[in-house]
Image (cartoon, grey):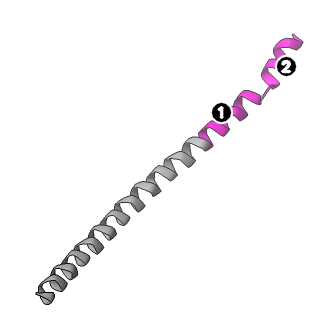
Amino acid sequence: MTTMARFFKDESGATAIEYGLIAALISVGIIAAATTLGDGLGNLFNGLGGKMNTAAGELGTAEE
């Protein structure tokens, strides 16, 4: 009987599951943030690249 009582009082498995759930939620948050920032940064750099190409094209025609 004491073995069964000890088994039901043991909370180490529940703690491990809680830590696993916390880690999973943090991972989902990091992935969502990286996706959002990645898209935003990609758009920013594409816009800057286009402006630099336009400026380089204008500079090239001004030198001729």
Total labels: the figure holds 2
Q: Residue at x 69, y 33 (%)?
A: 16
Indicate whether 13 appears above or below 64: above
Which of the two residues, 54 or 7, is positioned nearer the viewer here?
54
- Quadrant containing the N terminus in the rendered view: top right
Q: Residue 3's mark? A: none
> Residue 21, image x and y in percent?
60, 39
Kind of element beneath mark 2: helix
Please tell me whether the stretch drawn in magenta is mainly helix, strand or loop: helix
> Residue 41, image x and y in percent?
37, 65
Q: Which residue is mark 1?
A: 17
Kind of element beneath mark 1: helix
Report whether 4 appears left or right of 24. Answer: right
> Residue 29, image x and y in percent?
51, 52
Q: Residue at x 51, y 52 (%)?
A: 30
Mark 2 → mark 1, Cα distance in angstroms: 19 Å
Dot 1, crowdedness within 10 Å: few (<14), some or many (≥20)?
A: few
Please provide the residue range marked out in magenta.
1-22
Indicate whether 34 appears above or below 61: above
Q: Residue 6's mark? A: 2
Report whether 12 appears left or right of 62. Answer: right
Indicate whether 55 appears above or below 19: below
Q: Nearer the viewer, mark 2 or mark 1?
A: 1
Is 25 a magenta residue?
A: no
Indicate whether 41 appears above or below 18: below
What amino acid is at disc 1? Ile
* Corner quadrant of residue 13: top right
